[in-house]
Image (cartoon, grey):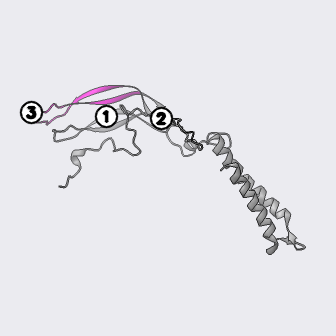
Amino acid sequence: MDVNNYLSWHLLLCLYCSLSSLTNKTVAGKPDLISCRMMAVQVSRAILPLMLTLFLGASSSVWPLAPAAAFQLPPCQLINQTVSLEKEGCPKCHPVETTICSGHCITKDPVIKIPFSNVYQHVCTYRDFYYKTFELPDCPPGVDPTVTYPVALSCHCGRCAMDTSDCTFESLQPDLCMNDIPFYY
């Protein structure tokens, strides 16, 4: 909410107080200014923290906790995860345990967009990792059965690197196996 909207609220309150002579909030035929001032103070108390949040961000001291802490979201960290490995030409998926990066990162989306400026959303992503090789069983002759997958060693909040992370809004679950999905012709 910008300053113009804030002033609009006060103008609406003044208009309401002017029209309050039509209601029972009058003293000797005039608007009850004490009631109008009390209402203005109540609205100001509600709007001021909202305006400060928009200008300073949710992590300012206006709110007792940042939204992530308020909802008890886990921070960016290493977690153990089962992933399904598969390869075209091999009939079955094989689940393996690995470590991945998962959790919440503090990020902001500016209210005022500046043309030609880049805004990056921080995501929980790999800092250090290595690739592990696995040999899929039951692959037919002529199909290379080896598959590599990443194993996270450490994580951080940073820009999403498309070469090592899934940067989509909602991705497939790591244990999803495409071979298990029925395919209709």
78 and 66: which one is in front? Answer: 66
Q: What residue sits 32% from the left and 30% below the top? A: 150
Q: Nearer the viewer, mark 1 or mark 2?
A: 2
Residue 121, given in percent of the width and then of the height, sits at 49, 37
> In percent of the image, x 19 and y 39: which residue is there?
88
Three-letter amino acid code of the residue under disc 2: Cys
The question of residue 97 being in magenta is answered with no
Mark 2 nearby-residue class (10 Å; few <14, some 14–19, many ≥20): many
Q: Residue 76, labelled with which disc?
A: 2
Magenta span: 129-153
Q: Report the residue at 59% width, 44% height from top.
A: 111
- Which residue lies most toward the right here? 28
In the image, what residue occupies the spot 60% across and 42% down? 66
Distance of label 1 from label 2 (alpha carbons)? 19 Å
The secondary structure type at the circle numbered 2 is loop
Front: mark 3 or 1: 3
Which residue reaches farthest front? 115
Residue 63 showing in the rendered view: no
How much space separates mark 3 and mark 2, taking CA atoms?
42 Å
Task: Identify the disc placed on residue 97.
Answer: 1
Question: Which amino acid lies under the numbered mark 1 shown in the image of this protein?
Answer: Glu
Residue 80 higher or lower than 128, as above or below: below
Comparing 168 with 182, the one in front is: 168
Q: Amino acid at mark 3?
A: Pro
